[in-house]
Amino acid sequence: MKKIVYSFLLLSCFFSSCSLDEEPQASASKDVIFGTESGLKTYSYSFYNMLPSASDAHKKDEMCDYGAVNSFDSFLREGAYSAETSSGWSWGDLRNINYFIANCVDESVDESVRNNYIGLARFFRAYFYYNMVIRFGDVPWIDKPLGVNDEQLFAPRDSRTVVMDKVLEDLNFACENISATKDATGSLVTKWVAYALKSRICLFEASYRKYHTELGLTDSADKWYQEAASAAETVMKESGYSLYTGKGTDLSYRTLFTSDDPVTSEVMLASCCSKELAVLNDANWYWTSGTYGPRFSMIRAYINTFLNIDGTPFTDKAGYETMSFYDECQNRDKRLAQIIRTPGYKRDGLPAAPNFNGYSYTGYQPIKFSLDDSYYDSGSLNTNAIPLFRYAEVLLNYAEAKAELGTLTDVDWKNTIGALRARAGITGGLTTKPTTIDAYFQKNYFPDISDASILEIRRERSIELALEGFRFTDLKRWKRGELMTMRWTGIYVPALNTPMDLDKDGTDDVIFYQGGKPTGLPASCTPVDVSLGTQRALSEGTHGYLTWSDNDPRKWYEDGRQYYYPIPALVIVKNPNLTQNPGWE
């Protein structure tokens, strides 16, 4: 069974398609493929190459508002990104899907069997178009394999209403016709994964239409919120999935991301690894290396949004602004200690404070996907499965859609946000909707939102789904791209030239200095230069928050052009009927 799962990686050489007018080449005849159930099944494996690999899936939030990195994407650098450097206008996967659907007509295969595999193909077509609409907005809708002389090769862009209505049709067909309801490996698309994707896509489209008023589509937003809520509710009532709590509040959450086998009580679809088959990922290398990865370090404004263990806002505490790293980590939402290194974290069985010696810029070092054995740090060695769809996301989709519709009840809250927070050890505010707005969270993140439930659902989403690839898309659909320029700050440093024992294990971990480098330090204590004019500094000169890259500002254009990527210039040269996205002309 497992060998079938990993065969996805081999099928890229079995079927290939590079452009809209190429016919996929197969090593077996068309009759063998489309005239038998086993042939349809084999072909369907090629669709899975569209999903992120395990090495890609843990990196999907590399560009987001809550992470400082060694060099930010040129998309956020003024004047550095253009139609000439853009990418992503690739249609080979769609050609492969449409070819399959057009040829899946052999009546010697039972209709219900054919519809199952067509449903799977349409699942992936919806997934393909969802990602294209996120990236480019309006795109041509193509639902057949094109020949070299087909006029549609030079078609203009269709409106998002046309495209997304077609996407919804595909999703509905997939939900109704995919027959599998369980997959023990956690690596195959089932009916419930189709419903989960439907809830994801419909929530995206609903909020994009509501908050991007320039589209003139606000009147149709509620329809999409209702579709999102309905799809999520189906999963909640019928699928049998639940939140994993098998290792208690201290470990259950992180176990979902470090287990070799997907935790299939909650993980609905994962990108799996196998040491036996040499299918591995590079999570440790990426999240611990000072040279290979981006040295992704979370920022203080985001860390401040993790609630206290009693459910109250951390920023309501007196003196939170100048708390030491150790103190700010105490009595917080237990996901904090499962997302970043906090006091008590160990590697190879030994205390491991945030690593300023070649990794962390801010002191908030992620651990969510990395394993605690340093053996895995030096290459693509990780065996842990990386979740792509989780039941937790379905709960968040449901809660947000219901809140936006104004129909969220206390029972809904308890069964969604309350359940997620209970798993994280939070004790207060689990059974009733919030009525008080967190002024810090509202001011710093969503100043135009005055509904306490919507604010708290957005907080919960940012924490529960941290680093799973949702954040930039969420900011785009909520029309909060400006957050991508948030200042990158870190832990509070009270004074220069003072050794700091970050985790209070009796060993000094770091000392910050300006000018001459301190000498006579123990091997455990990393000296960090925060001299004026360097890329890393202190907010108040000789004390304050660590800052990173203040001298290299990021840019979010006021005209909103970055809510879409530009269509690559060469594409428009080849098809002059395509128009460029505003601001990128």
Image (spheres, rainbow, N blue to C red):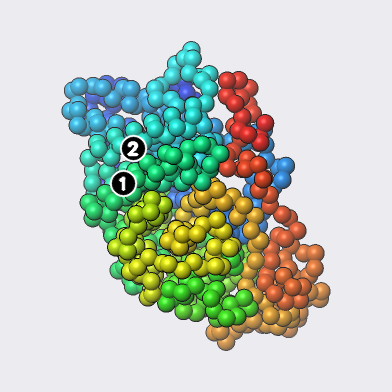
**CB within 8 Å, label 1 to label 2:** yes
**In terms of depth relative to the viewer, which is nearer, 216 or 229?**
216
In the image, which is nearer the foreground, mark 1 or mark 2? 1
Query: Quadrant of the rendered structure where residue 115 is?
Result: top left
**In terms of depth relative to the viewer, which is nearer, 135 or 520?**
135
Which quadrant, please, contains the C terminus? top right
Where 473 falls versus 130 (above or below)?
A: below
| Residue lying furthest top | 149
Upstream in the sequence, badge 1 or badge 2? Answer: 2
Q: Secondary structure at mark 2?
A: helix
Kind of residue sitting beneath label 1:
Ala
**In terms of depth relative to the viewer, which is nearer, 178 or 314?**
314
**Looking at the image, which residue is at 49% across and 72% down?**
313
Query: Quadrant of the rendered structure where residue 120 is?
Result: top left
Disc 1 crowd rating (10 Å Cα; few below 14, some 14-19, many 20+) is: many
**Marks 1 and 2, how far apart at CA:** 10 Å
User: Where does the image place residue 83, in percent across and percent down from the top left?
Assistant: 65, 33
User: In this rendering, does residue 275 appear at all?
Assistant: no
Where 433 falls versus 468 (above or below)?
A: below
User: Where does the image place residue 32, in percent across and percent down from the top left?
Assistant: 26, 24
Q: Which mark is residue 128?
A: none
Q: Which residue is mark 1?
A: 231
Q: Is residue 41 left or right of residue 254?
A: left
| Residue lying furthest bottom | 506
**In terms of depth relative to the viewer, which is nearer, 98 or 79?**
79
**Looking at the image, which residue is at 51% across and 20% down?**
155
User: Where does the image place residue 12, in percent across and percent down from the top left?
Assistant: 42, 35
User: In this rendering, does residue 113 appear at all?
Assistant: yes
**Looking at the image, which residue is at 24% across and 36% down?**
177
Q: Which residue is mark 2?
A: 171
